Image (spheres, coloured by chain):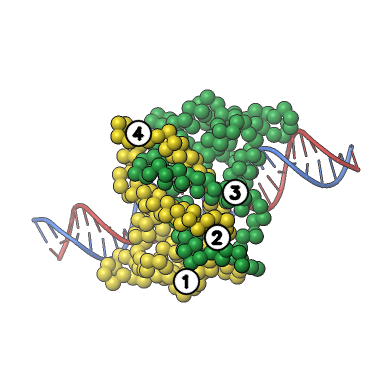
Chain colours: A yellow, B green, C red, D blue
Amino acid sequence: MQSVGSETDLASVESIEQELTLLVRRAQKVHLRGGPTEQVVERAAYGILAWLHDTGPLRSSELAAHFHLDASTISRQVAALEQAGLVTREPDADDRRALRLRLTDRGKKVLSTTRAERRGVVRELLRSWSPEDLARFASLLAAFNAGLDEHLTGDPHTAEGGQR
Amino acid sequence: MQSVGSETDLASVESIEQELTLLVRRAQKVHLRGGPTEQVVERAAYGILAWLHDTGPLRSSELAAHFHLDASTISRQVAALEQAGLVTREPDADDRRALRLRLTDRGKKVLSTTRAERRGVVRELLRSWSPEDLARFASLLAAFNAGLDEHLTGDPHTAEGGQR
DNA sequence: CCGTTATGGTTGGTACATGCAATCAGTTGG
DNA sequence: CCAACTGATTGCATGTACCAACCATAACGG
Protein backbone atom coordinates (compact mmCIF):
# COMPACT_ATOMS: atom_id res chain seq x y z
CA MET A 1 0.00 0.00 0.00
CA GLN A 2 1.41 3.33 -1.01
CA SER A 3 1.94 5.73 1.89
CA VAL A 4 -0.87 4.58 4.10
CA GLY A 5 -0.68 7.57 6.33
CA SER A 6 0.36 6.94 9.90
CA GLU A 7 -2.01 7.06 12.80
CA THR A 8 -0.67 10.48 13.56
CA ASP A 9 -1.67 11.67 10.11
CA LEU A 10 -5.14 10.32 10.59
CA ALA A 11 -5.40 12.09 13.89
CA SER A 12 -4.33 15.31 12.21
CA VAL A 13 -6.92 14.92 9.51
CA GLU A 14 -9.62 14.25 12.06
CA SER A 15 -8.57 17.22 14.08
CA ILE A 16 -8.48 19.45 11.01
CA GLU A 17 -11.94 18.36 9.98
CA GLN A 18 -13.21 19.11 13.45
CA GLU A 19 -11.57 22.51 13.69
CA LEU A 20 -12.72 23.53 10.25
CA THR A 21 -16.29 22.70 11.14
CA LEU A 22 -16.07 24.93 14.15
CA LEU A 23 -14.18 27.66 12.35
CA VAL A 24 -16.62 27.97 9.51
CA ARG A 25 -19.45 28.21 11.98
CA ARG A 26 -17.86 30.71 14.31
CA ALA A 27 -15.99 32.90 11.88
CA GLN A 28 -19.20 34.14 10.34
CA LYS A 29 -19.89 36.03 13.51
CA VAL A 30 -16.87 38.21 12.98
CA HIS A 31 -18.96 40.41 10.80
CA LEU A 32 -18.20 44.06 10.77
CA ARG A 33 -19.41 47.47 10.05
CA GLY A 34 -17.90 49.38 7.16
CA GLY A 35 -16.51 51.92 9.59
CA PRO A 36 -17.74 54.35 12.22
CA THR A 37 -20.24 56.20 10.09
CA GLU A 38 -20.20 53.89 7.14
CA GLN A 39 -22.93 51.59 6.08
CA VAL A 40 -22.78 47.92 6.88
CA VAL A 41 -21.23 45.75 4.23
CA GLU A 42 -22.71 42.28 4.15
CA ARG A 43 -20.35 39.46 4.75
CA ALA A 44 -20.93 38.20 1.23
CA ALA A 45 -20.53 41.64 -0.26
CA TYR A 46 -17.18 42.14 1.40
CA GLY A 47 -15.68 39.25 -0.49
CA ILE A 48 -16.94 40.65 -3.75
CA LEU A 49 -15.62 44.12 -3.07
CA ALA A 50 -12.27 42.77 -2.05
CA TRP A 51 -11.87 40.52 -5.05
CA LEU A 52 -13.04 43.21 -7.40
CA HIS A 53 -10.57 45.62 -5.90
CA ASP A 54 -7.66 43.21 -6.02
CA THR A 55 -8.20 41.91 -9.54
CA GLY A 56 -9.87 44.76 -11.39
CA PRO A 57 -13.16 44.91 -13.27
CA LEU A 58 -14.83 41.55 -13.66
CA ARG A 59 -17.97 39.98 -14.98
CA SER A 60 -20.54 38.39 -12.72
CA SER A 61 -19.70 35.02 -14.13
CA GLU A 62 -16.06 35.42 -13.17
CA LEU A 63 -17.03 36.28 -9.63
CA ALA A 64 -19.31 33.27 -9.49
CA ALA A 65 -16.49 31.04 -10.66
CA HIS A 66 -14.09 32.46 -8.10
CA PHE A 67 -16.40 31.87 -5.16
CA HIS A 68 -17.95 28.72 -6.61
CA LEU A 69 -21.38 30.23 -6.24
CA ASP A 70 -24.43 30.19 -8.43
CA ALA A 71 -24.69 33.06 -10.88
CA SER A 72 -28.01 34.09 -9.40
CA THR A 73 -26.51 34.53 -5.96
CA ILE A 74 -23.84 36.82 -7.31
CA SER A 75 -26.38 38.67 -9.40
CA ARG A 76 -28.43 39.64 -6.38
CA GLN A 77 -25.45 40.62 -4.30
CA VAL A 78 -24.06 42.73 -7.07
CA ALA A 79 -27.45 44.36 -7.53
CA ALA A 80 -27.39 45.30 -3.85
CA LEU A 81 -23.87 46.67 -4.16
CA GLU A 82 -24.87 48.76 -7.13
CA GLN A 83 -27.94 49.96 -5.23
CA ALA A 84 -25.63 51.04 -2.45
CA GLY A 85 -23.41 52.85 -4.91
CA LEU A 86 -20.37 50.69 -4.28
CA VAL A 87 -19.97 49.21 -7.74
CA THR A 88 -21.04 50.13 -11.23
CA ARG A 89 -22.21 47.81 -13.97
CA GLU A 90 -20.83 49.01 -17.24
CA PRO A 91 -21.93 47.40 -20.47
CA ASP A 92 -19.17 45.38 -21.99
CA ALA A 93 -18.21 46.53 -25.46
CA ASP A 94 -17.06 43.07 -26.52
CA ASP A 95 -20.25 41.29 -25.62
CA ARG A 96 -23.45 43.21 -25.19
CA ARG A 97 -24.95 40.55 -22.95
CA ALA A 98 -22.19 41.00 -20.41
CA LEU A 99 -21.45 43.68 -17.84
CA ARG A 100 -18.21 44.70 -16.31
CA LEU A 101 -18.31 45.35 -12.60
CA ARG A 102 -16.11 48.07 -11.24
CA LEU A 103 -15.65 49.55 -7.78
CA THR A 104 -16.75 53.12 -7.35
CA ASP A 105 -14.69 55.51 -5.25
CA ARG A 106 -17.22 55.03 -2.55
CA GLY A 107 -16.83 51.28 -2.91
CA LYS A 108 -13.09 51.59 -2.53
CA LYS A 109 -13.49 53.66 0.56
CA VAL A 110 -15.94 51.28 2.17
CA LEU A 111 -13.77 48.32 1.31
CA SER A 112 -10.76 50.02 2.78
CA THR A 113 -12.36 50.75 6.13
CA THR A 114 -14.06 47.37 6.36
CA ARG A 115 -10.90 45.59 5.44
CA ALA A 116 -8.89 47.55 7.96
CA GLU A 117 -11.38 46.62 10.63
CA ARG A 118 -11.32 42.94 9.74
CA ARG A 119 -7.57 42.88 9.61
CA GLY A 120 -7.55 44.55 12.98
CA VAL A 121 -9.60 41.75 14.45
CA VAL A 122 -7.37 39.12 12.92
CA ARG A 123 -4.26 40.92 14.11
CA GLU A 124 -5.71 41.12 17.57
CA LEU A 125 -6.61 37.46 17.53
CA LEU A 126 -3.08 36.56 16.50
CA ARG A 127 -1.40 39.09 18.74
CA SER A 128 0.52 36.50 20.69
CA TRP A 129 1.60 34.33 17.77
CA SER A 130 5.19 34.07 16.71
CA PRO A 131 6.12 35.44 13.30
CA GLU A 132 6.96 31.90 12.24
CA ASP A 133 3.52 30.61 13.14
CA LEU A 134 1.90 33.55 11.43
CA ALA A 135 3.76 32.87 8.24
CA ARG A 136 3.10 29.16 8.44
CA PHE A 137 -0.57 29.61 9.09
CA ALA A 138 -0.87 32.00 6.17
CA SER A 139 0.82 29.63 3.81
CA LEU A 140 -1.01 26.52 5.02
CA LEU A 141 -4.34 28.30 4.73
CA ALA A 142 -3.50 29.38 1.22
CA ALA A 143 -2.53 25.85 0.31
CA PHE A 144 -5.72 24.49 1.77
CA ASN A 145 -7.79 26.99 -0.14
CA ALA A 146 -6.02 26.08 -3.32
CA GLY A 147 -6.85 22.44 -2.72
CA LEU A 148 -10.43 23.31 -1.94
CA ASP A 149 -10.67 25.34 -5.11
CA GLU A 150 -9.39 22.44 -7.12
CA HIS A 151 -11.76 20.08 -5.40
CA LEU A 152 -14.75 22.28 -6.14
CA THR A 153 -13.64 23.03 -9.66
CA GLY A 154 -12.86 19.54 -10.79
CA ASP A 155 -15.11 16.55 -10.60
CA PRO A 156 -17.45 17.14 -7.69
CA HIS A 157 -17.61 13.44 -6.82
CA THR A 158 -14.26 11.76 -7.04
CA ALA A 159 -13.20 12.66 -3.53
CA GLU A 160 -15.53 10.35 -1.68
CA GLY A 161 -14.64 7.93 1.08
CA GLY A 162 -12.77 5.67 -1.27
CA GLN A 163 -14.56 3.05 -3.33
CA ARG A 164 -18.07 3.48 -4.65
CA MET B 1 6.93 49.30 22.31
CA GLN B 2 6.29 45.63 22.67
CA SER B 3 6.85 43.66 19.50
CA VAL B 4 5.52 46.01 16.87
CA GLY B 5 5.15 43.32 14.29
CA SER B 6 7.36 43.47 11.27
CA GLU B 7 6.16 44.12 7.79
CA THR B 8 6.28 40.40 7.23
CA ASP B 9 3.92 39.87 10.13
CA LEU B 10 1.53 42.38 8.69
CA ALA B 11 1.65 40.66 5.36
CA SER B 12 0.87 37.38 7.08
CA VAL B 13 -2.08 38.88 8.88
CA GLU B 14 -3.41 40.34 5.67
CA SER B 15 -2.98 37.07 3.91
CA ILE B 16 -4.66 35.18 6.72
CA GLU B 17 -7.62 37.52 6.71
CA GLN B 18 -7.94 37.09 2.98
CA GLU B 19 -7.70 33.33 3.05
CA LEU B 20 -10.14 33.02 5.91
CA THR B 21 -12.68 35.07 4.03
CA LEU B 22 -12.42 32.74 1.11
CA LEU B 23 -12.33 29.62 3.22
CA VAL B 24 -15.46 30.45 5.14
CA ARG B 25 -17.27 31.10 1.90
CA ARG B 26 -16.10 28.06 0.07
CA ALA B 27 -15.98 25.47 2.81
CA GLN B 28 -19.72 25.57 3.22
CA LYS B 29 -20.08 23.90 -0.12
CA VAL B 30 -18.41 20.79 1.16
CA HIS B 31 -21.75 19.70 2.45
CA LEU B 32 -22.45 16.06 2.54
CA ARG B 33 -25.00 13.37 2.70
CA GLY B 34 -25.26 11.19 5.77
CA GLY B 35 -24.26 8.19 3.75
CA PRO B 36 -25.41 6.25 0.69
CA THR B 37 -28.96 5.61 1.77
CA GLU B 38 -28.96 7.89 4.76
CA GLN B 39 -30.80 11.10 5.08
CA VAL B 40 -29.05 14.39 4.57
CA VAL B 41 -27.63 15.96 7.67
CA GLU B 42 -27.76 19.72 7.48
CA ARG B 43 -24.49 21.50 7.75
CA ALA B 44 -25.56 23.04 11.02
CA ALA B 45 -26.88 19.78 12.39
CA TYR B 46 -23.62 17.97 11.79
CA GLY B 47 -21.78 20.18 14.24
CA ILE B 48 -24.41 19.56 16.86
CA LEU B 49 -24.34 15.81 16.41
CA ALA B 50 -20.58 15.74 16.55
CA TRP B 51 -20.30 17.86 19.68
CA LEU B 52 -23.06 15.94 21.38
CA HIS B 53 -21.33 12.70 20.56
CA ASP B 54 -17.93 13.85 21.72
CA THR B 55 -18.98 15.47 24.97
CA GLY B 56 -22.07 13.57 26.04
CA PRO B 57 -25.58 14.78 26.82
CA LEU B 58 -25.88 18.56 26.86
CA ARG B 59 -28.45 21.26 27.24
CA SER B 60 -29.42 23.55 24.40
CA SER B 61 -27.85 26.44 26.21
CA GLU B 62 -24.53 24.65 26.38
CA LEU B 63 -24.61 24.00 22.67
CA ALA B 64 -25.45 27.62 22.03
CA ALA B 65 -22.50 28.71 24.13
CA HIS B 66 -20.16 26.34 22.35
CA PHE B 67 -21.07 27.57 18.89
CA HIS B 68 -21.69 31.16 19.97
CA LEU B 69 -25.13 31.03 18.46
CA ASP B 70 -28.45 32.31 19.64
CA ALA B 71 -30.50 29.90 21.71
CA SER B 72 -33.33 30.11 19.20
CA THR B 73 -31.13 28.90 16.39
CA ILE B 74 -30.08 25.87 18.36
CA SER B 75 -33.63 25.25 19.45
CA ARG B 76 -34.85 24.94 15.89
CA GLN B 77 -31.99 22.78 14.77
CA VAL B 78 -32.42 20.47 17.71
CA ALA B 79 -36.13 20.25 17.00
CA ALA B 80 -35.30 19.15 13.47
CA LEU B 81 -32.84 16.58 14.76
CA GLU B 82 -35.41 15.20 17.15
CA GLN B 83 -37.96 15.13 14.36
CA ALA B 84 -35.49 13.10 12.34
CA GLY B 85 -34.99 10.75 15.26
CA LEU B 86 -31.32 11.56 15.71
CA VAL B 87 -31.46 13.00 19.20
CA THR B 88 -33.80 12.76 22.15
CA ARG B 89 -34.77 15.52 24.52
CA GLU B 90 -35.00 14.10 28.00
CA PRO B 91 -36.33 16.23 30.81
CA ASP B 92 -33.60 17.18 33.21
CA ALA B 93 -34.22 16.03 36.74
CA ASP B 94 -32.25 18.87 38.29
CA ASP B 95 -34.13 21.64 36.53
CA ARG B 96 -37.49 20.98 35.03
CA ARG B 97 -37.15 23.86 32.58
CA ALA B 98 -34.15 22.26 30.99
CA LEU B 99 -33.74 19.32 28.66
CA ARG B 100 -30.80 17.04 28.14
CA LEU B 101 -30.02 16.26 24.55
CA ARG B 102 -28.71 12.83 23.79
CA LEU B 103 -27.82 11.08 20.56
CA THR B 104 -29.99 8.15 19.60
CA ASP B 105 -28.45 5.04 18.10
CA ARG B 106 -29.66 6.26 14.77
CA GLY B 107 -28.03 9.61 15.47
CA LYS B 108 -24.75 7.91 16.23
CA LYS B 109 -24.94 5.92 13.04
CA VAL B 110 -25.72 8.95 10.91
CA LEU B 111 -22.96 10.94 12.56
CA SER B 112 -20.52 8.16 11.99
CA THR B 113 -21.18 7.89 8.27
CA THR B 114 -21.35 11.64 7.74
CA ARG B 115 -18.17 12.17 9.68
CA ALA B 116 -16.40 9.46 7.77
CA GLU B 117 -17.43 11.09 4.55
CA ARG B 118 -16.29 14.52 5.63
CA ARG B 119 -13.00 13.20 6.90
CA GLY B 120 -12.60 11.45 3.60
CA VAL B 121 -12.92 14.71 1.75
CA VAL B 122 -10.45 16.42 4.05
CA ARG B 123 -8.03 13.52 3.75
CA GLU B 124 -8.34 13.67 -0.01
CA LEU B 125 -7.78 17.40 0.01
CA LEU B 126 -4.66 17.00 2.11
CA ARG B 127 -3.44 13.89 0.33
CA SER B 128 -0.20 15.44 -0.79
CA TRP B 129 0.67 17.23 2.46
CA SER B 130 3.60 16.19 4.57
CA PRO B 131 2.88 14.77 8.00
CA GLU B 132 4.60 17.81 9.49
CA ASP B 133 2.36 20.23 7.65
CA LEU B 134 -0.70 18.22 8.61
CA ALA B 135 0.24 18.33 12.26
CA ARG B 136 1.10 22.01 12.10
CA PHE B 137 -2.10 22.93 10.33
CA ALA B 138 -4.14 21.01 12.87
CA SER B 139 -2.50 22.71 15.78
CA LEU B 140 -2.57 26.19 14.27
CA LEU B 141 -6.23 25.81 13.41
CA ALA B 142 -6.96 24.70 16.95
CA ALA B 143 -5.06 27.67 18.33
CA PHE B 144 -6.90 30.03 16.04
CA ASN B 145 -10.23 28.59 17.08
CA ALA B 146 -9.31 28.98 20.71
CA GLY B 147 -8.50 32.62 20.11
CA LEU B 148 -11.72 33.09 18.22
CA ASP B 149 -13.65 31.49 21.02
CA GLU B 150 -12.05 33.83 23.49
CA HIS B 151 -12.72 36.81 21.28
CA LEU B 152 -16.39 35.91 20.94
CA THR B 153 -16.78 35.03 24.57
CA GLY B 154 -15.11 38.03 26.09
CA ASP B 155 -15.93 41.65 25.44
CA PRO B 156 -17.26 41.82 21.92
CA HIS B 157 -15.68 45.20 21.27
CA THR B 158 -12.16 45.44 22.62
CA ALA B 159 -10.53 44.03 19.51
CA GLU B 160 -10.88 47.08 17.31
CA GLY B 161 -8.18 48.67 15.21
CA GLY B 162 -5.92 49.41 18.11
CA GLN B 163 -6.30 52.65 20.02
CA ARG B 164 -9.69 54.18 20.43
C1' DC C 1 -30.83 35.34 -43.68
C1' DC C 2 -32.93 32.52 -40.39
C1' DG C 3 -33.43 28.74 -37.16
C1' DT C 4 -30.91 26.33 -33.43
C1' DT C 5 -28.10 26.10 -29.81
C1' DA C 6 -25.05 28.26 -26.42
C1' DT C 7 -23.88 31.87 -23.12
C1' DG C 8 -24.35 36.04 -19.73
C1' DG C 9 -27.46 37.64 -16.65
C1' DT C 10 -31.86 38.35 -14.05
C1' DT C 11 -36.03 36.95 -11.57
C1' DG C 12 -39.30 33.73 -9.10
C1' DG C 13 -39.64 30.31 -5.87
C1' DT C 14 -37.75 27.77 -2.10
C1' DA C 15 -34.83 26.22 1.79
C1' DC C 16 -31.66 26.84 5.42
C1' DA C 17 -29.20 29.72 8.93
C1' DT C 18 -29.38 33.13 12.15
C1' DG C 19 -30.65 37.01 15.30
C1' DC C 20 -33.87 39.78 18.16
C1' DA C 21 -38.15 40.31 20.65
C1' DA C 22 -41.81 38.31 22.99
C1' DT C 23 -43.52 34.60 25.58
C1' DC C 24 -44.02 30.57 28.71
C1' DA C 25 -42.52 27.69 32.36
C1' DG C 26 -39.96 26.74 36.11
C1' DT C 27 -36.31 28.53 39.83
C1' DT C 28 -34.54 31.44 43.40
C1' DG C 29 -34.40 34.85 47.00
C1' DG C 30 -36.52 37.98 49.64
C1' DC D 1 -46.12 34.53 47.75
C1' DC D 2 -44.13 37.92 44.56
C1' DA D 3 -40.20 39.66 41.88
C1' DA D 4 -36.34 38.81 39.28
C1' DC D 5 -33.95 35.43 36.72
C1' DT D 6 -33.13 31.61 33.53
C1' DG D 7 -33.98 27.63 29.94
C1' DA D 8 -36.31 27.09 26.07
C1' DT D 9 -39.60 27.95 22.21
C1' DT D 10 -42.03 30.71 18.74
C1' DG D 11 -42.90 34.81 15.59
C1' DC D 12 -40.83 37.70 12.55
C1' DA D 13 -37.14 39.58 9.68
C1' DT D 14 -32.89 39.10 6.95
C1' DG D 15 -29.01 37.00 4.55
C1' DT D 16 -27.21 33.32 1.74
C1' DA D 17 -27.76 30.05 -1.51
C1' DC D 18 -29.69 26.80 -5.15
C1' DC D 19 -32.56 25.49 -9.19
C1' DA D 20 -35.60 26.46 -12.84
C1' DA D 21 -37.47 29.58 -16.02
C1' DC D 22 -36.69 33.36 -18.66
C1' DC D 23 -34.68 37.26 -21.72
C1' DA D 24 -31.17 39.02 -24.56
C1' DT D 25 -27.32 38.50 -27.35
C1' DA D 26 -23.89 35.43 -29.76
C1' DA D 27 -22.26 31.81 -32.69
C1' DC D 28 -23.16 28.33 -36.02
C1' DG D 29 -25.12 25.82 -39.93
C1' DG D 30 -27.70 25.53 -43.50
Residue at the disc numbered 2:
A123
Q: Badge 2: few (under 14), some or many (20 or more) residues near its Cα, within 10 Å? A: many
User: Which sits in the foreground, B158 or D7?
Assistant: B158
Residue at the disc numbered 1:
A108
Find numbered disc 2 in the image and state the secondary structure of the residue it sits on.
helix
Q: Nearer the viewer, mark 2 or mark 4?
A: 4
User: Which sits in the foreground, B91 or C24?
Assistant: B91
Find numbered disc 3 in the image and state the secondary structure of the residue it sits on.
helix
Amino acid type shown at disc 2 = Arg
Determine the chain carrying the residue at label 4: A
Q: Is residue B54 left or right of residue A61?
A: right
Q: Position of residue A107 (x, y in %)?
A: 47, 70
Q: Are marks 1 and 3 in contact (CB under 8 Å)?
A: no
Q: Is residue B149 left or right of residue B97?
A: left
Determine the chain carrying the residue at label 2: A
Find numbered disc 4 in the image and state the secondary structure of the residue it sits on.
loop
- The C terminus of chain A lies in quadrant: top left
N-terminal of the pair, mark 2 or mark 1, is 1
- Residues under labels 2 and 3: Cα distance? 15 Å
Find numbered disc 1 in the image and state the secondary structure of the residue it sits on.
helix
- The N terminus of chain A lies in quadrant: top left
Residue at the disc numbered 3:
B149
Labels 1, 3: one chain? no
Labels 2, 1: one chain? yes
Amino acid type shown at disc 3 = Asp
Residue at the disc numbered 4:
A4
User: Which sits in the foreground, B16 or A29?
Assistant: B16
- Residues under labels 2 and 4: Cα distance? 38 Å
Amino acid type shown at disc 1 = Lys
